[in-house]
Image (cartoon, rainbow, N blue to C red):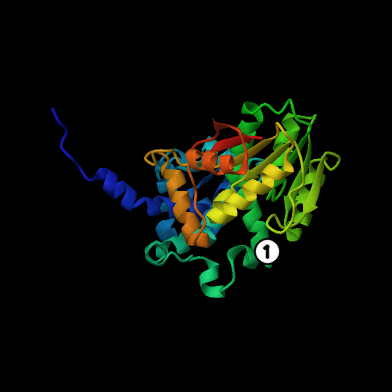
Amino acid sequence: MTQPLNPSHILQTATAFWASKTLLTATEFGLFSVLGKGSMTAAELGEELDLHPRGTYDFFDALVALRFLERDGEGVAGRYKNSPETALFLDQKSPQYIGGMLEMLNSRLFGFWNDLGVALRTGEPQSEVKTHGKPFFEDLYRDEKRLGQFLRAMSAFQAGNFLQLAEKFDFSKAQTVSDIGGGLALFSLIIGARHPHLTFQTFDLPPVASHAQKEIDAAGMSGRIRVVSGDFFADDLPGAEIITMGNILHDWNLEGKKLLIKKAYAALPEGGAFIAIENLIDDSRKENAFGLLMSLNMLIELGDGFDYTGSDFRDWCSEAGFRRFEIIPLAGPTSAAVAYK
């Protein structure tokens, strides 16, 4: 018997921003860090976060229902604590903290997405460039505070993918890696910890260098990871047996993508590998909703940047001279697209 149609999926998606904003606000308040490994009553937690009592039970219990908090007991005696996931990933004291990404989503992107309709009708970005009149990255790299937030967010976004790539890709045949747009050098730190025979160059614009060096020094890996400053459009890429780009290609229009691929090809020896770590859209463009939404996010952020399919990657890399390809699934919607010279 055919089940009657119902609007639950429509309504769940239409109100999904309620749940999103609840989680983002909890991260903004540092709620998960305040709880840490302990537990608190609603009154205690509300006082610690300086909340009005009207919303505390609804706020905390919504987080319980959404499975971001757990609660022992009922009513005023109930004690709230982190879920295993929020304790690991959203407590600032945890080495696996990913809240930087949520902080940026809350402070920047949540508001920008309100203008998705404008972006779709005009093809123009709806980020800071709309008000400042400057390209996003040019504006970003002039603001030390925003740059730091952006770099932390990108690191949080990619950590799980880098960990999986460290296990799934055969790094044994190479000695050198250049990570292009390396940010806080997280790729080099994670892959380097798993494969101690490798040495790295992490390449990014000059304002990033001090941020990256701080992370490298803290990890005790300054002997194996070298910070290289430059502009990947204006300068040659630092040569290595493996060239990597994590969430770099999707920032640019087709011309920019093809130029970066050609530069990667030129920086590799024969047999070398170019790895692009992205939220690759499935070739049928029906399944990877996150990849498609990320492409819309690139419209909002940058205007002409866009995400792409594995087939697109193969076509562009073939045009540059690469001969062999593979796609390696990583965490969630992300994959590593690999092209071999």
Provide the residue designation for mark 1: 141
Residue found at x 59% / y 67%:
135
Q: Residues within 10 Å of mark 1 (few under 14, many from 20)?
A: some
| Relative horizontal placement of residue 152, taking residue 21 as reference (left or right) | right
One can see residue 82 in this view: no
Q: Nearer the viewer, residue 326 or 86?
A: 326
Please identify the residue farthest to the right as the structure is shown.
Answer: 223
Quarter of the rendering occupied by the N terminus: top left
Q: Nearer the viewer, residue 265 or 68?
A: 265
Please identify the residue farthest to the bottom as the structure is shown.
Answer: 132
| Relative horizontal placement of residue 3, taking residue 43 as reference (left or right) | left
Residue found at x 52% / y 41%:
315
Residue type for callout 1: Tyr
One can see residue 295 in this view: yes
The tally of labels here is 1
Q: Nearer the viewer, residue 24 or 246?
A: 246
Q: Residue 108's x, y, as percent?
A: 53, 62
Residue found at x 78% / y 40%:
200
Vertical position of residue 147 compared to residue 338: above or below: below
Q: Residue 287's x, y, as percent?
A: 39, 38
Which picture quadrant has residue 233? bottom right
Quarter of the rendering occupied by the C terminus: top right
Label 1 sits on a secondary structure element that is loop
Please identify the residue farthest to the left as the structure is shown.
Answer: 1
Residue found at x 52% / y 74%:
131
Q: Residue 103's x, y, as percent?
A: 56, 55
Vertical position of residue 117 compared to residue 59: above or below: below
